[in-house]
Image: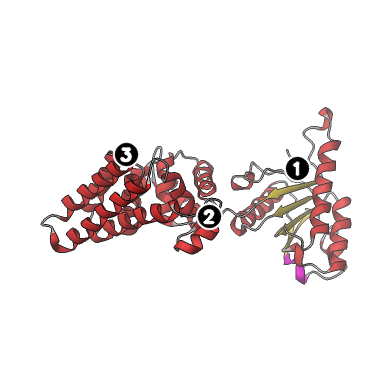
Amino acid sequence: MLPVMAARTAVTPPALGVVPVTLVVGEEEFLADRSVRDLITAAREAGLGGDLHDLDGAALSPGELASLTSPSLFGGGCVVVIRAAQNASKDVTAELTRYTQNPPPDAILILTHAGGAKGKELLAAVKDAARKDAAGKDAANKDRAGGARVIECPKITRFGERLDFVRAEFRRAGTRADDGAARALLDAVGSDLRELAAACDQLAADTEGGIDEAVVARYYRGRAEATGFTVADRAVEGHLAQALEQLRWALATGVSPVLICSALAQGVRLLGRVGSAPRGVSSAALAAEVGAPPWKIDRVRQQLRGWHPDGIARALHAVAEADAQVKGEAASAAYALERAVRRIVASRAGS
C-alpha cells in the first residue's frame, strides 16, 4: 500500500487497509467525508472499531487525546476521528504530532485537514511519518500495514476532473459508462459531487449493462434545460447526426422549442465570449466574467477547436433567426430548429 496517494486517487480509493494513523487532507469535503467513512468501515471489519470517537479539532482539549486512545477494558480497540485538525490549539497540535511518531497498535486515529498553512506542522509530521514508513519496508515485510498514511482529497474544479470523477463513480458502482454518458450526467445534474455520486449509484442500480448518453437522457428527460444543452453541445462540436437525434428526441418528449433554442444561443454565445478572451485567463476568472461555472468554461475551450470568428458570427445569425421563428414567425418550430442545427455545424466546418 502506498502511504501517500496521488492527487486523483481519492476519487476512487482502493480497498483501504488499517493503519494506526491516516491523514485525509484537502478541501473537497465530499471526498474527505467518504474517505473517513471508508476508513471507519475498514477498522470495524478488522475488529478495531469497538469504540468510535468523532470530534472537531477545535473542541479537543490538551490531554484528551491520550484518554480517547487508551485501551478499553472490554478490548476491541478504538477509532478516533479528529475533523478539521488544522483548527486544534497549539498544545493539542503538539500532542497530535507526538502521537503520530509512535502510535499505539490498538487505536486508529483519523485526521482531516484542509491543507494550507494553518496547522502545517501536523501536516508535515504525518507526511514525514508516512514517508519513513514506506522507506522502512522491505521485501519480507511488504504486506505489513504501515504506521501512517496520507489520502489527498484536493478540490475538484476543472471540467476534466469532474468527468474523471463521474467515470470513477460508475466504476465504483460496478458498471461501465462511456464519455457521452459522463458528459450528459454533468449537464443534467451539475457540478455538486454528492449529487453526481448519488446519480451514478442510482443509474447503476436501475440500468442493466453499460450506460450511454441515451440512457442518461431517458433517465433525466424531465430536465428540459439539460436536454437542450445536450443538443447545443453536439451542434457546436460538429456532430450533426447526434445533434439532430437529440433534437428530435427532445421534441418528441415534449421539450419546449424555446428552451432548446435558448440553449443553442447560449452555447454559441459562449464560444464567442470565451474565444475572444485574452490568453492565459484562468477558468475561474473567465467564469466570473461570463456568468458560467468554471467546468463549463473548460468544456467551451475544448469545443472551440475548429471554430473561427467568422464561423461563430454565422452561427450567431443562425440562432437569432431560429429564435424569431420558434416564437411565431415560422409554421414549424421543429424545422426551424433543425435548420439552425445544420447551419451551426456547417459554420464550424467552414462551409
**Residue 201 at x, y = what percent?**
47, 49
Left or right, 140 with reference to 305: right
Left or right, 137 with reference to 9: right
* Secondary structure beneath label 3: helix
* Secondary structure beneath label 1: loop
Marked residue nearer the N-terminal end (3 or 2): 2
Quarter of the image with the C terminus is top left
Cα–Cα gap, marks 3 and 1: 50 Å
Residue type (three-letter) at the residue carrying disc 2: Ser
Cα–Cα gap, marks 2 and 1: 32 Å
* Secondary structure beneath label 2: helix
Cα–Cα gap, marks 3 and 2: 26 Å
Marked residue nearer the N-terminal end (3 or 1): 1
Residue type (three-letter) at the residue carrying disc 3: Ala
Q: Which mark is residue 3?
A: 1
Marked residue nearer the N-terminal end (2 or 1): 1
Residue 33 image-quadrant placement? bottom right
Q: Which mark is residue 349?
A: 3
**Residue 214 at x, y = what percent?**
33, 44
Q: Residues within 10 Å of mark 3 (few under 14, many from 20)?
A: some
User: What residue span does the magenta drawing correspond to?
Assistant: 55-59
Quarter of the image with the N terminus is top right
Residue type (three-letter) at the residue carrying disc 1: Pro
